[in-house]
Amino acid sequence: MKIKKLEVSSIQEAIEILEREYGENAVILSSRVVKKRRLGFLPIFSKKMLEVTIGIKEEEDFRKEVERERELLREIESLKRIVSELVSNGEGKAQAHQKDEQYSSRVRRVFEKMVLKSVNREIAEKLVEDACGYDLDNRVYDFKDEPFRSIRESFEKNIKIEEGFLENPPRVVALVGPTGVGKTTTIAKLAHLLKKHTKRIGIITLDAFRVGAYEQLRKYAEVLGVPFKSAETPKDFGEKLLSMGDLDVVLVDTAGRSHYDVVRLKELEAFFKVSEISTYLTIAANLSELVMYEAIMQFGAFSIKGLIFTKLDETPCPGSIINVAYRTQYPILCFTTGQILPDDIVMANYDYLVRLILEDEDENRPAVELTLS
Ligand SMILES: Nc1nc2c(ncn2[C@@H]2O[C@H](COP(=O)(O)OP(=O)(O)OP(=O)(O)O)[C@@H](O)[C@H]2O)c(=O)[nH]1
Ligand SMILES: [Mg+2]
């Protein structure tokens, strides 16, 4: 990719030049405000301009891009199917199911609980099916073992969890995701846990423009006594990563991007080309499931390694977590359960996941008639 700098008065102007002169062949990599002297020899009368760094793609980039876009299209197609399933799932509820009587009453109760917690009916059915075996004496399908253990076994088969992260973390870990989902807070919580596991860590923020966001993490890094840096351009980022080369793990915080803001997402993508980075998509559990899939589609360009679900304390329907993890087969790294630093975090594990779905936090909720379908 060839790099070129443009001096413009607004980002809009840069986008217009890009579209006019390079069409699809160029992307914005970074931008910064610079002062230009109107009279070269006088320091006054300076004017603020925007210096925009653009990357112009070459043939090799195109080949990779086409491959990536194809991959993305395949993912979009599969996600579209999921969305239409989601929409039609409501209709399916009315259908009686012949299999109903084939299951023991305790299996049906577990199934009902899953659906109440928003696990998709078909996924819930698959999860209970994998937890059951045929009981010849009673002529029904029943759990192979005690219910909790059987469901746990089925979760192990159907849902991926990233294990061993604290003991053996990737070298560079970045959190991306929509605005305000809790990326910065989660970085701070992970930093604390990694430190407890005697890892030598550093933190880099790519969100240096917003003073509040920068200060929030800087102070926390200071409390933990870990090196903290910010990077404003991909090149700068590469250098900062190199300067932290002797550490076990570098945590990278990114500014929240609306997943609808394609230009800013492209900008962020440029940072992720400087090194091998394990990228985790952070999603708030209280978002609607459709918005979760939209975020997965848009951030898909980052080669997502795994998922982080935040704000579990703010949703009565954690079933969406199961649905998303089952359908995407991305491993879950961790959950966050509140605003308190550093405690409100749980590294993903199957026991926790099963409790999340099967435990009643509100036994007084009126019972809802559901059948196993
Ligand atoms: N209830 C609850 N609030 C959380 C949780 N995690 C983060 N928050 C809150 O969510 C708000 C946003 O958190 P941040 O960590 O700044 O989110 P962010 O994704 O870094 O935000 P941007 O950088 O602006 O995109 C803050 O008020 C956090 O305290 C959680 O697990 N539960
Ligand atoms: Mg943040």
Image (cartoon, grey):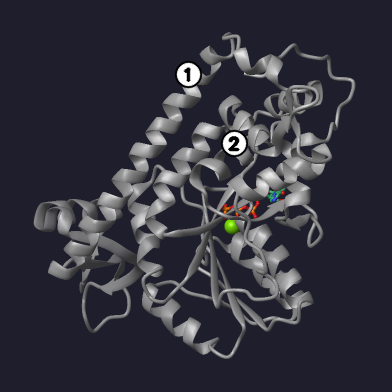
Q: Residue at x 60, y 66 (%)?
A: 214
Residue found 52% across the figure and 67% down from its top: 208
Mark-to-mark CA distance, 1 and 2: 20 Å
Label 2 CB, ligand 1: below 8 Å?
A: no
Q: Is residue 325 above or below residue 230?
A: above
Q: Is residue 10 visible?
A: no
Quadrant location of the N terminus in the rendered image? bottom left
> Counting other residues with Cα less than 10 Å from the Cα at mark 2, is it few (<14), some (14-19), or many (20 or more)?
some
* Image position of 355 with respect to 253: above or below: above
Identify residue type, mark 1: Ser
Q: In this orientation, which residue lies closer to the viewer: 277 or 112?
A: 112
Where is residue 358 shown, x and y percent of the image?
79, 35
Q: Amino acid at mark 2?
A: Leu
Residue under circle 2? 287
Q: At x 40% / y 68%, what residue is drawn? A: 272
Element at label 2: loop
Q: Nearer the viewer, mark 1 or mark 2?
A: 1
Q: Nearer the viewer, residue 348 or 286?
A: 348
**Residue 161 pos. (x, y %):** 63, 56
How crowded is the residue under tag 1: few (<14 C-alpha within 10 Å), some, or many (20+)? few
Residue 266 visible in the picture = yes
- Say which residue label 1 marks: 88
Asked whether, in this view, residue 340 is left or right of residue 5, the answer is right
- Asked if disc 1 and disc 2 are in contact, CB closer than 8 Å, the reply is no
Extreme residue toward the left, this view: 21
Question: For the C terminus, which image quadrant?
Answer: top right
